[in-house]
Image (tube, rainbow, N blue to C red):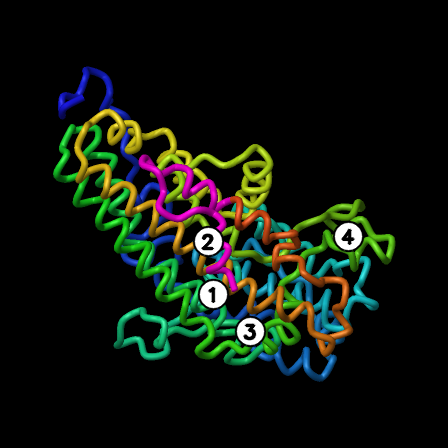
Amino acid sequence: MNGVIPAGLAGSDHIPRLCDYDVSGKYGFMVDDPLTDLPPYFSPWMKIANNLQSLVKNDRLREAVHQMPLLDYTRLEGVKEWRLAHVVLSFISSGYVWVKGEEHIPKVLPRNLAIPYAGISDYLGMTPSFTHSSSVLANWKLIDPSKPAELDNMDTIIKVAGGWDESWFFMVAGAVEIDCAEGLKAILNAQQAVADCQVERLKKSLREMETSLQKMKRTLARMHERCDPDAFYNGFRPFLAGWDGAAFRNKGYNGLIYEGVNDEPMQYVGGSAAQSTSVPAFDAALSVEHTPEEDKLRAHFREYMPPAHRAFVDAITNGPSIRTFVQNFEDDVLEEAYNQCLDALKQFRTQHIQIVTRYIVIMANRKDSNKKFANQGKAGTGGTGFMKFLKNLRDATTETTLTTPTQTSEDDDKDDD
């Protein structure tokens, strides 16, 4: 097209603003300066949450929950109190279900836990289950408030069973979310550049998106530094599971009954990185198209994202098409910037696959795994048979490249070991 933009190609589509979708320009999808404590009225919840690891270790959690009063959750004020309450009850509920292992999972979540948990979740538009949002996005604090929000200065507010390994696991995910913030701003700048037909601005924004993805990958690669695979797989990973897996089916349960909320059992998957909005935002911006099978599963995981974040991805999807602009504007440098961004996204997905291999696949094949949770096997933390899913997502990223990719999917598989 020799650099000539036909009328209507760039369009005048609405460009979303981060602030309209509960997204921070500094922290991305992470809650900006989350609360670490609730008002005194809710101290029964906080007392259990702050002592959760000890209660789990000593097998006294269910006893503590049974003694907990039924609190009026509507006395929560402000979204940050509601988000922290969701974190607290997510961890307590997960601990309550799994503390005695798969053979002794309960059929019912008691009303003093179920009623406020369901009510808070309904108010937030979120599921009453353990999610990426409850374990990462709203479950973080700075070790030293005078220092920046970087991985080495971050800790979880609540832990269930894994000590520092657990904190590091969740905070690596949190730091990746923060690394994504600059990329999210670059996505919106790129779409604005398309709408305004500003080619040089688009090139700059694509390079900023690539830089953000590279930083996300480097942070993710630090997982091994302080999170031992055994501590993850046999220690706290079992508590991330949902109410939809083999353990419940083997007991003849169709999920978990939330007493006082619903007489029928409710099924939810467990916490999973697939519930993060960061990578789907890049997929939407770069027009990465997945297969119907993968899209069905991706849509299922979207249900576990905060509603505003789901809407943000939709807004990017419906905004000006970066890919269409690049395809129709014959500029080799622009095309290369777009392809390099895709390659950075593919590399991030490869890094994720490598971590999943080390922390789940290899561990599942060992004979010394925790027999209390034998049914979880090689399922992902969200309860999915995930390796094919993850590799297909990566393949779709490669196939989106505008020129013939230099590395095939077979070459990618060599990087998964």
Q: Amino acid at mark 3?
A: Lys
Residue 364 appears in the picture as rendered: yes
Circle 3 is placed at which residue position?
159
Is label 4 in a helix, a strand or a loop? strand
Question: Mark number for residue 139?
Answer: 1
Badge 2 or badge 3: first in the primary sequence: 3
Q: Does the magenta segment cover residue 195? A: no
Would you place residue 198 above or below residue 180 in this image? above
Nearest the viewer among 166 and 147 is 166
Badge 2 or badge 1: first in the primary sequence: 1
Q: Residues within 10 Å of mark 4 (few under 14, many from 20)?
A: many
Question: Mark number for residue 390?
Answer: none
CA–CA distance in space, label 2 to label 1: 34 Å
Q: Residues within 10 Å of mark 1 (few under 14, many from 20)?
A: many
The image quadrant that residue 150 belongs to is bottom left
At 67% from the left edge and 61% from the top edge, which residue is drawn? 378
Circle 2 is placed at which residue position?
412
Q: Residues within 10 Å of mark 3 (few under 14, many from 20)?
A: many
Is label 1 in a helix, a strand or a loop? loop
CA–CA distance in space, label 3 to label 4: 24 Å
At 18% from the left edge and 36% from the top edge, which residue is drawn? 332
Check if mark 3's residue and mark 4's residue have beta carbons within 8 Å: no
CA–CA distance in space, label 2 to label 3: 35 Å
Please provide the residue range marked out in magenta. 393-417
Badge 3 or badge 4: first in the primary sequence: 3
Circle 4 is placed at which residue position?
257
Q: Residue furthest right?
A: 252
Q: Position of residue 277 (x, y in %)?
A: 44, 48
Badge 4 or badge 1: first in the primary sequence: 1
CA–CA distance in space, label 4 to label 1: 26 Å
Nearest the viewer among 361 and 81 is 361
Q: Position of residue 225 (x, y in %)?
A: 44, 78
